[in-house]
Amino acid sequence: MDVMQKFKNEFFEERKDLLSKNHVYRNHINKFVNYLSLPDVQLSNAPARININIVEECIRYYHNKGELNSRSTMESQLESVKSFYDYLSETGKTTDIFSDYNYSKFKDDIVDKYSLLEPVERGSYKCEDIKIILMELDKAIDNFQNKPAGIREEERHLQRIILRLFIKLTLIAPAKRGVITSIKKSDITKDYKKLLINGIAVNIPCGLSRDLCAALKYAESKNKEPIKEEDNFFEYLYKYKGKFRVESLNTWFYNAAQDFGVMEDECKNKKTLAVEPIKNMVIQMMVDNMINPVFISKIAGLTLTMIEATYYPKDWNAKREEDINKCINKSIAQNDYYCYV
């Protein structure tokens, strides 16, 4: 049996719990290992020669076969292979080929290179529901400080800290989930007053500034080392618990909605709740504030065509503004939820 085939079987056997929660992983990992066994590839017995470029070539192979045509399918493929390599590195079988790369940028580059279809994210949440969740998260996090806690309670506390930061960051900078979770310490000014994201300098409200400082202080006490400028913010916060997975946010958001008795219709017959519609809600509110779609496109990291087609009437005529940073920050500050951030 080939080495990578053997590793795959061991992964399937030892990570049954993970696979039961992520059914597509098995299929995508099978396809990846099958690709390594192709006559033109022949890397199934050479794990040390497999790198990030091989992963991209695998994506190109299935794209050319017509089996991988959208961003969502590509991301599913990458998440599956990434989880496989998490296991391989943790068990000492081989190194993690993803560790030295900007994962979010790698995905975006593949989308551009192969012209993969972007998902059309439909729907948005009610502003009132998001405000309630933020208020309840604030109370739950504050109350935790005065209570003795077990391992599960501590885990839930950390999840809520990270979820609150993600929601608030999305509310001031409605970028893609992968962009928000790729923020590095160096993207935030030392006084925690500005965030640089998608080339825009976004004002950080006082409440969020306090939350960022408190989250870092909590994580530093657990990690026993300070955060470095080049560190990924979310990965550092979760570091002492293990690897931070972006898709976990959907589960944590669902759990919060359930815990606080909010968004019952949205949670019905589901086990997770997508966080992307939070971004859609903010974009819609910026549109309602009559912001130039060019500016929204910039902060959101979406094409101008998609922004105009999704949110603007056909007779929309953009008014030019001189200062993009000032315009966006003014628009965000006008939104109803801003005082909760």
Image (tube, rainbow, N blue to C red):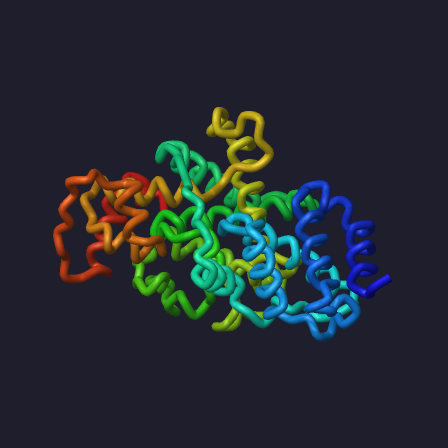
Between residue 241 and residue 144, name the one nearer to us: 241
Residue appearing at x 18%, y 62% in the figure: 323
Residue 154 location (% of width, % of height) = 64, 47
Q: Which residue is most to the bottom? A: 49
> Is 174 positioned to the left or the right of 27 in the image?
left
Residue appearing at x 23%, y 45% in the figure: 334
User: How many numbered discs sit on the rendered protein?
Assistant: 0
Residue 168 location (% of width, % of height) = 40, 48
- Quarter of the picture holding the N terminus: bottom right
263 vs 170: above or below: above
Between residue 244 and residue 95, name the one nearer to us: 95
Q: Quadrant of residue 3?
A: bottom right
Q: Is residue 269 visible?
A: yes
265 vs 136: above or below: above
Residue appearing at x 21%, y 60% in the figure: 324
> Is 326 positioned to the left or the right of 262 in the image?
left
Residue appearing at x 81%, y 52% in the figure: 14
> Is 126 positioned to the left or the right of 290 in the image?
right
Q: Quadrant of residue 235?
A: bottom right
Q: Is residue 182 visible?
A: no
Between residue 213 and residue 307, name the one nearer to us: 307
Residue 11 location (% of width, % of height) = 78, 55
Q: Which residue is most to the right? A: 1
